[in-house]
Image: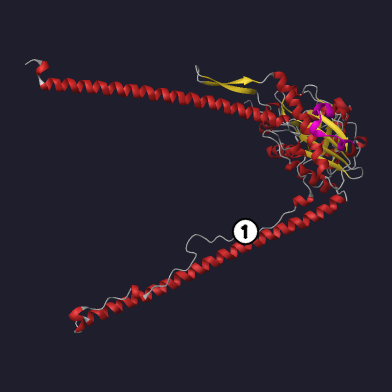
C-alpha cells in the first residue's frame, strides 16, 4: 500500500514533523535564554565595575576632604559630652505565659444527665452519678494543676522582674559612679593634673572618626608647668589611597580590570592625607580643650610599617610640628592648602613620605614617663677586672645603663618596684634610627628562661618601644634566640657580648659569669 495513502504512515510523518518543530522551538528558546542570561551577566559585571569605581571615587574624595567643614564644625568632645545618662530598660517578660491561664470551669467537666423517658423514670442514675464523681475528681485535679502552674508562673515572673530591677540598679550605679569620677576628673583637669589631662586627650583621639585604614595608635605627654602637650600618632600607610582610579569590564576576557591611579596623583593625595590628619588632630585637641589648659601642641606623625630594603619593622616620623593656641586659632583650615599650612607653622614634612623618608621630630618624649631613679656611678668603684656576678643587682643595672650611655644612648634607670620588667630606658636620638629602647638586665649564672624573653616582647609592645634589649651575664637558649629573631625588635646580649661591648666602649675588662655549655649540633 502506498505510503502517501496510508493513514498510519501519514500520522507517523505528522508526529515526526511535530517533534522536529518542538525540538527547533526548544533550541530557539534555549538560545534565547542563553543570550538573555549572557546579556544579564555582562550587565551585572559592568554594573559591578561601575560600583567599584564609585567606591574608589568615594574613598578618594573622603581622603581629600578630611578637613571639610562638617568635620571641623562638629561638636567637640568635652567633659559634658562624656557624661552618661541612665535610661532604665523596659521589662520584657520571659518567654511563656504572661497572663494567668483561665480557671477550669465545671461546665467543661460535668457529664450530661440521662435524657428522654429513661431519664425521667430515673433509669441510668447510678451510672450518671459515677460519671459525675469521676468528673469531679478530674475537675479538682485540674484546679490543683492550675494553682501549681500559676504559682510557678508568678514566681518565674517575679524572679525575672527582680533580676531586671537589679540590672537597672547596677547600671544606674555604674552611670552615677562614672559621672562622679568624671566630675573629679574635670576638677583635676582644670588643676592641670598630668594624668587627667593625658586621659582626656586620649579620649579625644579615640573619639575622632576617620575613614577605614587609619590606625588608632597614639601616645601623649603633658607638661603641667608650661601647658605643653606632646602627641605622637600613627598615620595611615600609603595603601590607604586607592590604587585604582576606576574599573572597567572587558567582555572578551570576562574580567574587571583596574584603571591605575597615576603615581603622581597617588603620592600627592597621600602627602595631603598626612598633612590633613596632622592639622585635624591639633584642631580637635585645641577645640575640645575648652578650659584652656593646653597652651601648645607638639605633634609627631609616624607610620608603622616594614622597611622594603631590610624587611624589618620601622616606625619613621613623617610629619612633626609645634603650634601654640593663639597662632593655630587664626587658621581657617577649610580653606588652607594642608602642606602649605604646615610649612607656615614651621613644621617638618617628609620630602618623600611615599618612600618613608623620615624627618627628625621637633620634640620627643622625655623619659619621665617611666618610674625613674637617680643614676649611680658604679664604674668608679670597680676593680680593674670586675666579676659581674659579684655586683649587687642594682649595681649591675646601673653599670648596664652606663654602658649604653657610652654607646651613645640617653639612658636612665627605672625604680626597682613596679618597673614592668624594665630596668632602664634609653633614647636613640639619631634622626633615622631614633626610638625608645627598653633595657632589662639579668645577673644570673643560669640560662635565661624563654618566658623572660617573651615577657620583654610584651613590654616592648605595651610601651610602643622601638627595641627591647635583654642583657645577661649568662646565655640564652635556642628557642629564645629564634623567638627574638622572629620578633624583629628584640636584641639578646649574652655574657660574651657584654665582654666585647665593655671593652670597646668603656675600655673595661669584665668577667661575666659561667661559661655556657656547648650547644649540640642541630
Outermost residue toward the bottom in this view: 121
496 lies above or below 292: above
In the picture, residue 402 is in which quadrant? top right
Instruction: State the count of labels.
Output: 1
Answer yes or no: is residue 517 visible. no
- The residue at the point 74 percent across, 23 percent down is 268
Give x and y (percent) for residue 231: 81, 37
In the picture, residue 265 is in which quadrant? top right
Outermost residue toward the front in this view: 5
Quadrant (top left/top right/bottom left/bottom right) for the N terminus: top left
Q: Secondary structure at mark 1?
A: loop
Q: Residues within 10 Å of mark 1 (few under 14, many from 20)?
A: few
Give x and y (percent) for residue 36: 42, 25
Q: Is residue 248 left or right of residue 475?
A: left
Q: Which residue is mark 1?
A: 89
Outermost residue toward the left in this view: 1
Q: Is residue 338 left or right of residue 379?
A: left
The way the protein has been coloured in the rendering is secondary structure
Answer yes or no: is residue 255 visible. yes
Inspect the magenta stretch and tell me whether residue 332 lies in it.
yes
- The residue at the point 74 percent across, 33 percent down is 66
Quadrant (top left/top right/bottom left/bottom right) for the C terminus: top right
- The residue at the point 73 percent across, 59 percent down is 176
Q: Main secondary structure of the magenta part?
A: helix
Q: Nearer the viewer, residue 448 or 10?
A: 10
Give x and y (percent) for residue 455: 71, 40
Give x and y (percent) for residue 277: 76, 33
Outermost residue toward the right in this view: 380
The magenta span reads 327-341
Q: Is residue 179 left or right of residue 89?
A: right
Q: Nearer the viewer, residue 420 or 401?
A: 420
Amino acid at each position: 500500500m502506498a505510503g502517501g495513502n496510508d493513514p498510519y504512515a501519514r500520522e507517523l510523518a505528522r508526529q515526526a514533523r511535530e517533534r522536529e518543530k518542538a525540538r527547533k522551538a526548544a533550541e530557539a528558546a534555549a538560545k534565547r535564554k542563553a543570550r538573555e542570561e549572557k546579556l544579564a551577566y555582562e550587565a551585572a559585571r559592568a554594573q559591578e565595575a561601575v560600583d567599584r569605581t564609585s567606591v574608589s571615587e568615594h574613598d578618594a574624595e573622603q581622603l581629600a576632604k578630611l578637613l571639610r567643614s562638617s568635620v571641623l564644625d562638629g561638636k567637640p568632645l568635652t567633659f559634658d559630652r562624656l557624661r552618661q545618662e541612665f535610661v532604665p530598660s523596659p521589662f520584657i517578660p520571659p518567654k511563656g505565659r504572661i497572663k494567668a491561664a483561665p480557671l477550669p470551669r465545671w461546665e467543661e467537666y460535668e457529664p450530661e444527665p440521662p435524657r428522654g423517658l429513661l431519664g425521667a423514670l430515673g433509669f441510668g442514675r447510678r451510672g450518671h452519678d459515677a460519671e459525675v464523681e469521676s468528673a469531679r475528681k478530674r475537675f479538682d485535679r485540674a484546679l490543683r494543676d492550675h494553682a501549681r502552674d500559676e504559682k510557678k508562673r508568678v514566681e518565674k515572673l517575679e524572679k525575672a522582674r527582680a533580676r531586671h530591677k537589679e540590672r537597672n540598679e547596677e547600671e544606674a550605679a555604674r552611670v552615677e559612679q562614672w559621672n562622679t569620677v568624671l566630675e573629679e576628673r574635670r576638677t583635676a583637669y582644670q588643676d592641670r593634673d598630668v594624668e587627667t589631662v593625658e586621659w582626656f586627650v586620649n579620649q579625644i583621639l579615640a573619639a575622632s572618626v576617620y575613614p577605614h585604614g587609619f590606625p588608632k595608635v597614639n601616645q601623649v605627654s603633658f607638661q603641667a608647668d608650661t601647658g605643653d602637650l606632646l602627641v605622637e600618632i600613627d598615620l595611615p600607610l600609603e595603601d590607604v589611597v586607592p590604587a585604582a582610579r576606576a574599573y572597567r569590564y572587558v567582555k572578551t576576557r570576562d574580567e574587571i580590570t583596574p584603571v591605575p591611579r597615576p603615581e603622581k596623583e597617588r603620592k600627592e593625595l597621600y602627602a595631603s592625607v598626612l598633612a590633613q590628619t596632622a592639622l585635624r588632630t591639633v584642631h580637635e585637641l585645641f577645640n575640645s580643650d575648652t578650659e584652656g589648659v593646653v597652651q601648645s601642641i607638639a605633634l609627631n606623625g609616624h607610620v608603622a610599617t616594614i622597611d622594603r630594603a631590610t624587611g624589618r619593622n620601622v616606625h619613621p616620623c613623617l610629619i612633626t610640628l609645634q603650634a601654640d593656641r593663639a597662632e593655630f586659632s587664626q587658621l581657617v583650615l577649610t580653606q588652607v592648602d594642608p602642606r602649605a599650612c604646615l610649612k607656615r607653622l614651621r613644621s617638618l614634612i617628609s620630602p618623600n613620605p611615599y618612600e618613608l623618608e623620615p624627618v627628625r621630630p621637633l620634640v620627643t618624649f622625655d623619659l619621665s614617663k617611666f618610674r625613674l631613679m637617680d643614676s649611680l656611678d658604679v664604674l668608679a668603684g670597680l676593680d680593674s677586672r670586675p666579676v659581674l656576678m659579684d655586683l649587687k643587682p642594682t649595681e649591675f643595672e646601673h653599670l648596664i645603663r652606663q654602658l649604653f650611655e657610652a654607646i651613645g644612648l640617653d639612658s636612665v634607670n627605672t625604680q626597682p618596684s613596679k618597673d614592668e620588667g624594665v630596668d632602664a630606658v634609653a633614647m636613640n636620638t639619631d634622626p633615622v634610627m631614633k626610638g625608645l629602647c627598653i633595657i632589662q638586665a639579668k645577673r644570673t649564672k643560669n640560662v635565661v628562661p624563654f618566658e623572660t624573653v617573651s615577657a620583654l616582647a610584651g613590654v616592648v609592645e605595651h610601651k610602643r618601644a622601638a627595641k627591647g634589649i635583654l642583657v645577661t651575664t649568662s646565655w640564652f637558649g635556642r628557642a629564645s634566640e629564634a623567638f627574638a629573631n622572629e620578633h624583629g625588635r628584640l636584641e639578646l646580649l649574652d655574657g660574651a657580648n657584654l665582654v666585647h661591648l665593655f671593652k670597646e666602649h668603656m675600655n673595661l675588662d669584665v668577667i661575666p659569669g659561667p661559661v655556657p655549655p656547648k650547644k649540640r649540633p642541630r
